[in-house]
Image: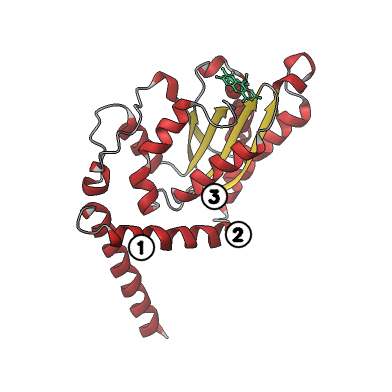
């Protein structure tokens, strides 16, 4: 299993989030995953400028590191997101990346992959951020399997406890297990199906302008219809 770990802290590999993420990676590697960490802070991923070019052409008009990172994710089976809690949300580095994925969200283009989220904070309140990050994974088509977080102020001597380390390692191992067994969670499937329907309607509404996305949805429709036809023939 190829896994990309997107780390969105300005402290990069020396920060708390990297520290916690490393235990997730350790668990994933022990379970057989190949992992690569990408520090968003070290890459130039500018904020989305809302030009809509990705909806028309399938690629972003901005010439920075975004497309390269997108390709790496396309070629991977798993994604681990890591962010510090910045004012009840993710860091600006991660938010910029998320916004640049607008075209991916319209087409759920990362479908078939599995993901998990990692958050650290000074004082807590991380659950809603994990949920937000996992919802982002879901709307790109990635099946989120869970998350792990740590409140630094609550840790003895600022060290991760064995309990937190183990939760992180287990999350990494579970990510690999979910991918191996092609796990589906009925709630995730239901939410993803509802979102897919919404995006299809949105793209069809904008079909004159968002030609790339419209063609993609059209082809998908034909694929589904021909799969249905061959299933009918088989029966
Ligand atoms: C700009 C900024 C905003 C922050 N906002 C919060 C916050 O809202 N709640 C909180 O508990 N900690 C907050 N923190 C603390 C960080 O989340 C915490 O130190 C985190 O572990 C840093 O991770 P890192 O070392 O990977 O960058 C903030 C820190 C910064 C620099």
Q: How many marks?
A: 3
Spatial CA distance of label 1 from label 2 is 21 Å
| Quadrant hosting residue 235 | bottom left
The residue mark sitting in front, 3 or 2, is 2
Q: Which residue is mark 3?
A: 179
> What percent of the width, then of the height, locates residue 222?
28, 69
| Quadrant hosting residue 175 | top right
In what element is the residue under mark 3? helix
Q: Which residue is mark 1?
A: 201
**In the rendered view, does 121 fall on the left or right side of 11?**
right
> What percent of the width, then of the height, locates residue 58?
25, 46
> What percent of the width, then of the height, locates residue 35?
50, 32
Crowd tier of the residue under label 3, counting other residues whose Cα lies within 10 Å: few below 14, some 14–19, many 20 or above:
some
Spatial CA distance of label 3 from label 2 is 17 Å
Q: Does label 1 point to a residue whose CB lies under 8 Å from ligand 1?
A: no
Q: Which residue is mark 2?
A: 187
Query: Is disc 1 in contact with disc 2, using a CB cutoff of under 8 Å?
Result: no
């Amino acid at each position: 299993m190829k896994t990309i770990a997107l780390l969105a802290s300005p402290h990069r590999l020396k920060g708390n989030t990297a520290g916690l993420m490393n235990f997730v990676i350790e668990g994933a590697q022990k379970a057989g995953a190949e992992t690569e960490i990408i520090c968003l802070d070290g890459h130039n991923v500018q904020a989305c400028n809302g030009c809509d070019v990705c909806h028309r052409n399938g690629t972003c008009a901005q010439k920075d590191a975004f497309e390269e990172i997108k390709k790496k994710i396309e070629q991977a089976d798993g994604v681990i997101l890591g962010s510090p809690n910045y004012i009840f949300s993710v860091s600006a580095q991660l938010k910029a990346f998320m916004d640049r994925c607008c075209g991916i969200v319209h087409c759920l283009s990362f479908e078939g992959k599995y993901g998990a989220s990692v958050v650290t904070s000074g004082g807590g309140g991380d659950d809603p951020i994990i949920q937000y990050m996992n919802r982002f994974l879901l709307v790109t088509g990635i099946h989120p399997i869970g998350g792990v977080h740590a409140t630094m102020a609550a840790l003895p001597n600022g060290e991760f406890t064995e309990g937190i380390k183990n939760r992180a390692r287990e999350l990494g191992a579970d990510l690999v297990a979910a991918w191996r067994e092609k796990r589906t969670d009925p709630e995730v499937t239901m939410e993803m199906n509802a979102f897919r329907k919404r995006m299809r309607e949105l793209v069809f509404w904008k079909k004159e302008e968002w030609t790339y996305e419209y063609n993609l949805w059209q082809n998908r429709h034909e694929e589904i219809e021909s799969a249905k036809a061959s299933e009918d023939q088989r029966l």
